[in-house]
Image (cartoon, rainbow, N blue to C red):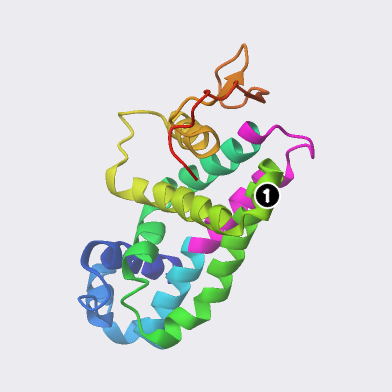
Amino acid sequence: MRRQVLDTAARLFREDGYSAVSLRGIAAACDMQAGSLYYHFTSKDEIVSEILRLGVEHVYRAVRAAVEALPENTPPLRLIGVATETHLRVLLELQDYTSANIRIFGQVPRAVRDRHIALRDEYEAFWSQLLRRAVPRASARGRHLAVARFFLIGAMNSALEWYRPDGDSIQSLAQSLTQILLFGLVGRTRVNSTNSAPGATRHLTRRTPPATPACSP
């Protein structure tokens, strides 16, 4: 019953936002008396807090496990590609929790938010470590590293709003995001590989830069 309450509440928060959802509404959607909720949760904010935790924790745990299963010398494209694909897959499989997390985090009371900042910061720090591992030179350019992390996590999370299973596969989307992050759109880097699949071993090579840069630093 506890899981049913959480599943239902996550869907309602995702659809209606924090303020519009009440304990009575959650109970009605679960086909139970409002008082019965108190056997499992003491308040609406306790339910919200658990949904926020699960929304981040499931994604973080899956991404970390996928990365830890890779060899230490995994090429950058595969390293970031595996992490990106795993984040997207879990994000989209747990849509009610993850989407509710993204939608209502700024709406919940400050005390609830504060309890979850440490977990969110830990997951962001994990991605910073991945990016440093993939592109060691980025470590000396902290601001660029932070922007790259914001770009990638923001792009992945936005897929909750527009991704459709009948379009590109999650694997294909992960590949596109990874290539854009690591190589950009200007074509000054390329991937040498005989296999275009995201799981294939790849090597980064630099093309000869143009005689005149496109813009000044």
Question: The disc labelled 1 sits on which kind of residue?
Answer: Arg
The quarter of the displayed image where residue 165 is located: top left
Find numbered disc 1 in the image and state the secondary structure of the residue it sits on.
Answer: helix
User: From the viewer's perspective, is 91 left or right of 158?
Assistant: right
Q: Is residue 67 left or right of residue 164?
A: right
Mark 1 lies on residue: 132
Q: Where is residue 67 drawn, in percent x and y?
A: 68, 44
Q: Quadrant of the N terminus?
A: bottom left
Relative height, residue 50 to residue 134 (above, below): below
Q: Nearer the viewer, residue 31 or 79?
A: 79
Residue 33 forms part of the magenta stretch: no
Residue farthest right in this picture: 72
Query: Between residues 121 and 190, which one lies in front from this camera angle?
Result: 190
Q: Is residue 49 above or below residue 63?
A: below
Q: Main secondary structure of the magenta part?
A: helix
Across and down, in percent, residue 40 comes to 44, 81
Residue at x 58%, y 57% (from the top left corner): 60
Residue at the image position 73 percent from the left and 41 percent from the top: 69
Figure disc tally? 1
Q: Which x, y percent locates residue 186?
A: 44, 29
* Closer-to-camera residue (33/91): 91
Q: Kindly tell me whether residue 39 is visible in this rendering.
A: no
Q: Is residue 44 visible?
A: yes
Tell me where the magenta segment starts and ends, as one range.
Answer: 56-77
Q: Is residue 74 magenta?
A: yes
Q: Residues within 10 Å of mark 1 (few under 14, many from 20)?
A: some
Q: Residue 48 location, x and y as percent?
A: 39, 76
- The answer to whether 126 is drawn above or below residue 39 in the figure is above
